Amino acid sequence: MKYITIALAKGRLAKQTLALLEQSGITCEEMKEKDTRKLIFVNEELRLKFFLSKTSDVPTYVEYGAADIGVVGSDTIMEEGRKILEVLDLGLGKCNMCVAGPASASALLQKNEIIRVASKYPKIAKDFFYNKRHQTVEIVKLNGSVELAPIVGLSEVIVDIVETGSTLRENGLEVLEVICPLSARVVVNEASMKMQRERITKIIRDLKCAVNSETR
Ligand code: PRP
């Protein structure tokens, strides 16, 4: 039997996803070994392989079929714009994609002024300002600690993820507009869904049951 390969985004989401997989009967003991530098883990009995990758690479692995299934945040799915099937909302890592900045920047949004927007998500920021707000902006791509940008004068506002809101609060910033809610999703390679339909839909069905029993 062919292996089914599952790509997980490194970090907290991977741990939460593994817990859900375990609840649905899919375990991977190898992955639990502490301090392992291994990148790929196998469950021979179930003919499954797992690997951890950088979050933004998960949709790429799935689009090219290097992974049949992936678990990644909807922010990354939107930003990467890959040709993949989004099949299940795991309800994990719930947060919002927002426009944020100092309270004073709110007037700049109202007046549709040409402003600078810093973000790790230039595609989402561009789509929001150009297609939804019809506001011309200059987008500056950053790779992290985006909250710094309006504080040091790089941009007027940012487009970023807000979970608890504490990073914004502690830096004198606030949510100016919510763009969309976000959560972790299961994505599937299009060809794999055709070739391995039965096994993949069973995994999705079992994961769905685990999600439902969590939320009950
Ligand atoms: C994320 C996000 C915000 C923060 C939001 O950053 O980009 O900075 O978390 O969380 P909060 O609303 O609970 O404060 P992350 O920790 O991933 O690091 P980064 O800033 O380097 O991207």
Image (cartoon, rainbow, N blue to C red):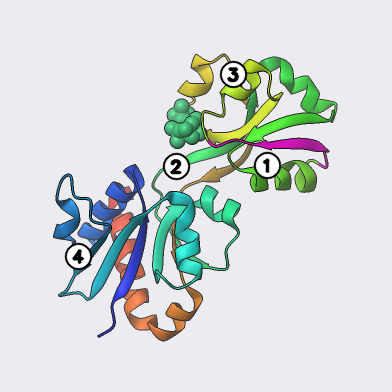
Q: At label 3, which amino acid type do we have? A: Leu
> Closer to the camera, 204 or 35?
35
Q: Nearer the viewer, mark 1 or mark 4?
A: 1
Question: Seen in the image, is 34 located left or right of residue 95?
Answer: left
Please state the horizontal and vertical placement of residue 137, each as a whole percent of the image: 79, 36
Q: At label 4, which amino acid type do we have? A: Gly
Q: Is residue 78 above or below residue 203?
A: above
Question: Seen in the image, is 55 located left or right of residue 80?
Answer: left
Crowd band around label 3 with a 10 angstrom C-alpha radius: few (<14), some (14–19), many (20+):
many
Q: Which residue is mark 2?
A: 94
> Closer to the camera, 54 or 1?
54
**SS assignment at label 3:** loop
Crowd band around label 2 with a 10 angstrom C-alpha radius: few (<14), some (14–19), many (20+):
some
Q: At label 2, which amino acid type do we have? A: Lys
Q: CA distance from mark 1 to mark 3?
A: 18 Å
User: Residue at point 36% right, 61% down?
Assistant: 7
Residue extending farthest to the front is 37
| Sequence-first disc among 1 and 3 | 1
Question: Seen in the image, is 185 located left or right of residue 43?
Answer: right
The answer to which image quadrant residue 126 occupies is: top right
| Sequence-first disc among 4 and 2 | 4
| Sequence-first disc among 1 and 4 | 4
Q: Which residue is mark 1?
A: 125
User: Residue 173 has which mark?
Assistant: 3
Q: CA distance from mark 4 to mark 2?
A: 24 Å
User: Residue 25 has which mark?
Assistant: 4
Mark 3 near ligand 1 (CB under 8 Å)? Answer: no
| Sequence-first disc among 2 and 3 | 2
Tell me, yes or no, whether the two marked residues, 2 and 3, touch with CB atoms within 8 Å: no
